[in-house]
Amino acid sequence: MDLLLRLLERRVIIIGAVLLGAVWAGGRFGGYAQGRADLMMHPPAPAVSPLAADIKKDVEARESARLKGLHRAVSAEIAAARANGFNVDRFQRLADGALRLDTPAYRPAAIERLNKLRLAIPQKREAFRPAAADDLNPDSFDTARPKGTPSRR
């Protein structure tokens, strides 16, 4: 009972309230102090160095050239399909539309579209003939000697 009466004294209640308030304020506003200290210890780097801008420009030019080369290849396949008598005007419009997406944000989507378009281009059927049973296999890579042939010494 004596301990309970001592805990209900004014100074114990005030010390407890101050301690509780300090814990709450530390949890609520402690991140600001930590952020300021982190900013002072590790200041931000400059926005972009001139060399980094040159490297980025070179990479963008290389990626753009890669997309344009893929567009030329797809256009050549479309022209070959047109020469074979297929109606591929829609494919050429789609390829030209994909070339208009030549920005860093849309370039991967443009490359994917051109690759999918490349698979959809119709191609001329190749003429095949069935092999006869007595035909030799022209693609044989068997280099072993026949068993009855003596070896040179």
Image (spheres, grey):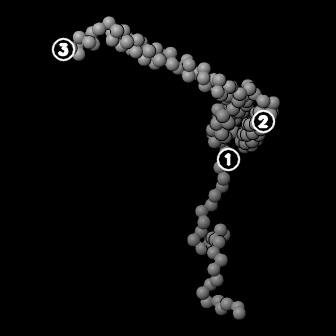
Q: Which residue is mark 3?
A: 1
Q: Looking at the image, can residue 43 be seen?
A: yes
Q: Nearer the viewer, residue 24 or 70?
A: 24
Q: Quadrant of the C terminus?
A: bottom right
Q: Examine the image and state in which quarter residue 7 appears.
A: top left
Q: Which residue is mark 2?
A: 55
Q: Examine the image and state in which quarter residue 147 appears.
A: bottom right
Q: Which residue is mark 1?
A: 124
Residue drawn at x 67%, y 36% as measured from the top left = 111
Q: Looking at the image, can residue 79 be seen?
A: no
- Residue 78: x, y in percent? 72, 39
Q: Are marks 2 and 3 in contact (CB under 8 Å)?
A: no
Residue type at tag 1: Lys
- Rounded to the nearest angstrom, the CA distance separating label 3 from label 1 is 101 Å
Q: In the picture shown, does residue 70 fall above or below 48?
A: below
Q: Residues within 10 Å of mark 2 (few under 14, many from 20)?
A: few
Residue drawn at x 40%, y 15% as measured from the top left = 19
Nearest to N terminus: mark 2 or mark 3: 3
- Rounded to the nearest angstrom, the CA distance separating label 2 from label 3 is 78 Å
Residue type at tag 3: Met
- Rounded to the nearest angstrom, the CA distance separating label 1 from label 2 is 44 Å
